[in-house]
C-alpha cells in the first residue's frame, strides 16, 4: 500500500502531512521555525532560522520513514526570495531531503487544488511571507496571484506593538504591492476576481480566527473549523477582542501560541482581501497546499 508524506516549508512554520493510499489525512504536524525572519532586511535566510528548519525537517523525515512513505518537500515565499536559498537547499539535500521551490503563482494554485472546491470559488491564503489569491470553477484554475506581503514581514516592518496608524500603513502596502511576475497591484488583482463566488480561506490566520470564533481555544481541532462559515463581522469581532490583549496574552491562548504576535497582521490582511473581493463571508478550510502539493505531485508522476 502506497502512503504519502508532504512537508511545506513556509516563512513562519514547517508543516507535515501524512496521508494513506486513499489520500486521506492521517496526521498533520506543525513546527514554528521562522526561517524567513529578517529576510526583508537582509535578503537572506538567517543561520538560526535555517538550523531550526533543518532540525524540524530531520524529525519529519524520520516520521515519514516510520510511516512508510517518501518525504515530498516544497518551499514557498522566504526560500524562493532568499539570496542564499541554494545554501539551504544544499544543506537539506545533505540530509537526504530534496526540496522543490515553488513560485507565487504555483503556490496559489496548490492551495486552490488542496481545497477541492466545487462551483465558482475564490481562495485566500495568508502566509508569513506572502499572500495568495486564486480563482477557478469546478476544479479548473482560472487565475492565481501572489504578493510578498505576509504576517512575518508585517511584524518586522511595523513591530509587535503596531496600532491603528501602522495597520493603515499595512493596508496601503498590501493594496499597492505588485503581484509576483506581473504589473497589477494586489488591489487590482483582487478586484479583477469579482464576483468572487464562494470565498475560501486557508492557513494559520483563517484557521486561528475561526477556532477562536467557535470557542475552540485550548488546542487546534481541524474538525471544529473545517467548512465553518465566518462573516466579515465575525472576523472583525475576533480581531477587536484580540486587539485588546497584549502580545503575551495572545500568545497564552493555546490555539494561537507562537502565532500570537502575528494574528492581528494576518487578520488585517484577511479583512482587506474580503473587502476587495466584495465578500461578506469566508468558508474556512483546513485542507490547503499540503493536499494540493500531494495531488500535484501525483499528477506530475502520472504524466511522467
Image (cartoon, rainbow, N blue to C red):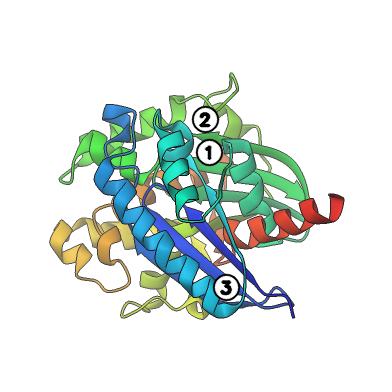
User: Residue placed at 73% from the left, 75% from the top?
Assistant: 2
What element does badge 2 sit on?
Answer: helix
How many residues crowd mark 2 within 10 Å: few (<14), some (14–19), many (20+)? many
Q: Estimate the x, y position of residue 188 in percent, counting from the top left.
A: 57, 27
Tell me, for residue 276, which label it has, or none. 1
**Please, what secondary structure does the residue beneath circle 3 have?**
strand
Mark 1 or 2: in front is 2
> In the figure, 53 relative to 255: above or below?
above
The label shown at residue 18 is 3
Mark closest to the chain's N terminus, 2 or 3: 3
Q: Residue furthest front?
A: 94
Verify CB contact (< 8 Å) between mark 1 and mark 2: yes
Q: Which mark is residue 187?
A: 2
Mark 2 near mark 3, Cβ–Cβ under 8 Å?
Answer: no
The circle on residue 36 is none
Indicate the position of residue 254 as horizontal and vertical percent values.
27, 74
Q: Quadrant of residue 57?
A: bottom left
Identify the residue at horizontal 35%, vertical 60% (top origin).
55
Given the current orientation, which residue lies at the most extreme top position? 183
Q: Where's residue 35, x and y in %? A: 34, 47
Amino acid at each position: 500500500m502506497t502512503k504519502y508524506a508532504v512537508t511545506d516549508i513556509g516563512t513562519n512554520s514547517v508543516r507535515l502531512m501524512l496521508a494513506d493510499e486513499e489520500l486521506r489525512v492521517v496526521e498533520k504536524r506543525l513546527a514554528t521555525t521562522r526561517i524567513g525572519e529578517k529576510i526583508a532586511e537582509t535578503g537572506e535566510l538567517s543561520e538560526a532560522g535555517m538550523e531550526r528548519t533543518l532540525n524540524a525537517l530531520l524529525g519529519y523525515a524520520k516520521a515519514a520513514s516510520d510511516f512508510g512513505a517518501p518525504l515530498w518537500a516544497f518551499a514557498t515565499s522566504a526560500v524562493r526570495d532568499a539570496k542564499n536559498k541554494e545554501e539551504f537547499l544544499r544543506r537539506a539535500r545533505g540530509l537526504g531531503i530534496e526540496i522543490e521551490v515553488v513560485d507565487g503563482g504555483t503556490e496559489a494554485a496548490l492551495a486552490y487544488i488542496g481545497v477541492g472546491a466545487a462551483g465558482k470559488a475564490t481562495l485566500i491564503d495568508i502566509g508569513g511571507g506572502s499572500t495568495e489569491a486564486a480563482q477557478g470553477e469546478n476544479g479548473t484554475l482560472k487565475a492565481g496571484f501572489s504578493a510578498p506581503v505576509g504576517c512575518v514581514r508585517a511584524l518586522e516592518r511595523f513591530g509587535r506593538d503596531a496600532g491603528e496608524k501602522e495597520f493603515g500603513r499595512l493596508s496601503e502596502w498590501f493594496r499597492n504591492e505588485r503581484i509576483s511576475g506581473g504589473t497589477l497591484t494586489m488591489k487590482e488583482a483582487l478586484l479583477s476576481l469579482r464576483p468572487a463566488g464562494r470565498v475560501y480561506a486557508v492557513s494559520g490566520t483563517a484557521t486561528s480566527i475561526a477556532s477562536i470564533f467557535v470557542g475552540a481555544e485550548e488546542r487546534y481541532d481541524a474538525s471544529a473549523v473545517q467548512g465553518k462559515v465566518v462573516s466579515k463581522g465575525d472576523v472583525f469581532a475576533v480581531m477587536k477582542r484580540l486587539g485588546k490583549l497584549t502580545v503575551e496574552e495572545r500568545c497564552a491562548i493555546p490555539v494561537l501560541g507562537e502565532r500570537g504576535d502575528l494574528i492581528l497582521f494576518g487578520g488585517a490582511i484577511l479583512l482587506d482581501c474580503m473587502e476587495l473581493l466584495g465578500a461578506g463571508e469566508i468558508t474556512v478550510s483546513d485542507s490547503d497546499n499540503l493536499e494540493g502539493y500531494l495531488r500535484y505531485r501525483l499528477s506530475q508522476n502520472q504524466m511522467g
